[in-house]
Image (tube, helix red, strand yellow):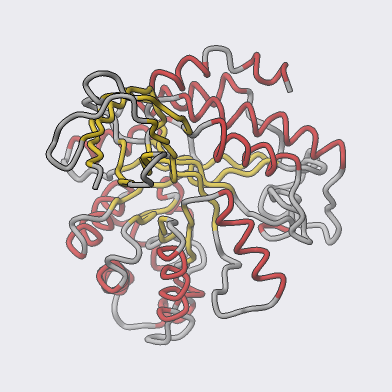
């Protein structure tokens, strides 16, 4: 584990610099007079950074033991959930949608302090067969879909992977692919973003891709030049063939940070079993038995700790989403943070330590003669409690200007 951390040299210093900010608390009497010598407890309740996973197996209506355990594993570690809006499965027949099921999933997220994201609105895969049989062209159907979903989920889902893998859309022989070939990939992305923005001007819109090549960079440049910008650049990082060198991961961050937009690592998978054999195609290799192994779990643990630490240290990165929580979901791979029976792997346990303890601030402070106390604290949501009286206040520590919080005792 130490070797992996050495590879992320400088990460802890960057975390201290970029993920924390100065915080001052002031304790007063009811009349505003400062109170020296008070003991106050500072407890971080949540992180400003988004630690996520796709939540495709979430079923709030299922009260069975496995589903309860799945929900527990999710909320214990994560504050960000990607929900499935693939067109072909969301709307298998014209007008028959999974809207109520997805709203139930989104409500569960909201009730548990988890930010919900929809994925994806526009994609050339999981494309419904019926859409190509309609008289309306694909663009009209897609526009209606995007505007309708974003508007109907406003307030429940306000983060969207609007356009997914558009750098490769032209290769597909369906309505989406034909539209991309007709107008170009940049125009497809621009129109998709425009539709989503018009349905919810406050939404966070993500341009998501796995294609970390100049093609993606040029697309971003053209979108920014035309003022048709996304809010976030989404970066996929599936590692079924082997783990990225940490140098590559940091280089990707630096390359896309130059555009001045936040970065979300939207789909991250690291195997705890055998990698895909040479000559096999990613996406098609799905053996019936693809087990996790003790050696693979140890390798996954070392890499996940180093990779998350590196990304958490980079100032442009705002979110990391794992893909998928249990083994055997996506492509039948042992890519989960928990096993198929939902027992935690070492990587899950280590992330739990990092996310809920090492990367959170919990402190007891004493006020000075001016009733003040200070700390350098991780960004996020907090509860400040006067130890003696139990009086408390909750607040957000967002960084930027040093946060100042006042607790007036009753």
Please report the residue visible at 31 percent of the width from the left and 59 percent of the height from the top. Answer: 158
Residue 312: x %, y % from top left: 49, 30
- Residue at 79% over, 38% down: 278
Residue 346 image offset from top left, x and y in percent: 75, 40
Q: From the viewer's perspective, tell me whether residue 152 is left or right of residue 240.
A: left
Given residues 326 and 271, the one toward you in this image is: 326
Across and down, in percent, residue 148 comes to: 27, 74
Q: Report the front residue among 274 and 183.
A: 274
Q: Is residue 348 visible?
A: yes
The residue sitting at the left extreme is: 31
The image quarter in which residue 87 lies: bottom left
Relative side of 210 to 387, left or right: right
Task: Say which quadrant the N terminus sits in.
Answer: top right
Closest to the observer, 265 or 240: 265
Tell me if residue 382 can be seen.
Answer: no
Is 365 left, or right, of 29 in this rendering? right
**Residue at horizontal 24 percent and vertical 48 percent from the top:** 410
Image position of 237 with respect to 122: above or below? above
User: How far from the left and from the top, in percent, is residue 217?
Assistant: 36, 32
Relative vertical location of residue 23 with respect to residue 152 in this rendering, above or below: above
For the image, the number of numbered tags is: 0
Relative height, residue 284 to residue 15 (above, below): below
């Amino acid at each position: 584990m130490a070797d992996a951390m050495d590879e992320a040299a400088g990460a802890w210093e960057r975390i201290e610099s970029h993920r924390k900010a100065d915080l001052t608390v002031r304790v007063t009497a009811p009349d505003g007079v400062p109170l020296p010598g008070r003991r106050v407890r500072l407890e971080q309740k949540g992180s400003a950074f988004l630690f996520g996973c796709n939540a495709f197996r979430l079923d709030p209506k299922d009260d069975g033991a496995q589903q309860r355990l799945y929900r527990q594993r999710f909320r214990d570690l994560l504050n960000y959930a990607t929900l499935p809006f693939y067109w072909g499965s969301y709307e298998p027949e014209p007008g028959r949608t999974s809207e109520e099921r997805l709203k139930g999933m989104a409500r569960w997220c909201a009730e548990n302090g988890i930010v919900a994201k929809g994925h994806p609105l526009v994609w050339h895969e999981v494309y419904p067969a019926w859409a190509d049989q309609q008289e309306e062209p694909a663009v009209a159907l897609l526009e209606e879909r995007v505007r309708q979903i974003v508007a109907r989920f406003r307030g429940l889902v306000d983060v969207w992977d609007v356009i997914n893998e558009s750098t490769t859309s032209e290769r597909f022989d369906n309505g989406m692919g034909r539209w991309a070939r007709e107008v170009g990939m940049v125009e497809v992305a621009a129109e998709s973003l425009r539709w989503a923005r018009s349905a919810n001007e406050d939404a966070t819109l993500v341009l998501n891709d796995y294609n970390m090549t100049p093609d993606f960079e040029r697309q971003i440049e053209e979108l920014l030049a035309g003022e048709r910008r996304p809010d976030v650049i989404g970066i996929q990082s599936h590692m079924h063939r082997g783990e990225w060198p940490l140098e590559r991961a940091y280089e990707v961050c630096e390359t896309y940070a130059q555009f001045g937009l936040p970065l979300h690592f939207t789909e991250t998978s690291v195997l705890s079993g055998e990698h895909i054999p040479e000559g096999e195609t990613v996406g098609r290799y799905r053996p019936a038995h693809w087990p996790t192994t003790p050696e693979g779990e140890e390798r996954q643990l070392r890499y996940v700790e180093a990779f998350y630490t590196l990304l958490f240290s980079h100032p442009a990165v705002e979110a990391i989403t794992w893909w998928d929580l249990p083994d055997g979901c996506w492509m039948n791979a042992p890519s989960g943070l928990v096993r198929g029976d939902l027992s935690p792997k070492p990587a899950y346990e280590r992330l739990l330590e990092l996310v809920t303890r090492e990367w959170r601030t919990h402190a007891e402070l004493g006020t000075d003669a001016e009733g003040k106390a200070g700390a350098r604290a991780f960004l996020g949501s907090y509860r400040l409690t006067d130890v003696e009286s139990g009086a408390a206040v909750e607040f957000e520590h967002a960084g930027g200007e040093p946060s100042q919080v006042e607790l007036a005792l009753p």
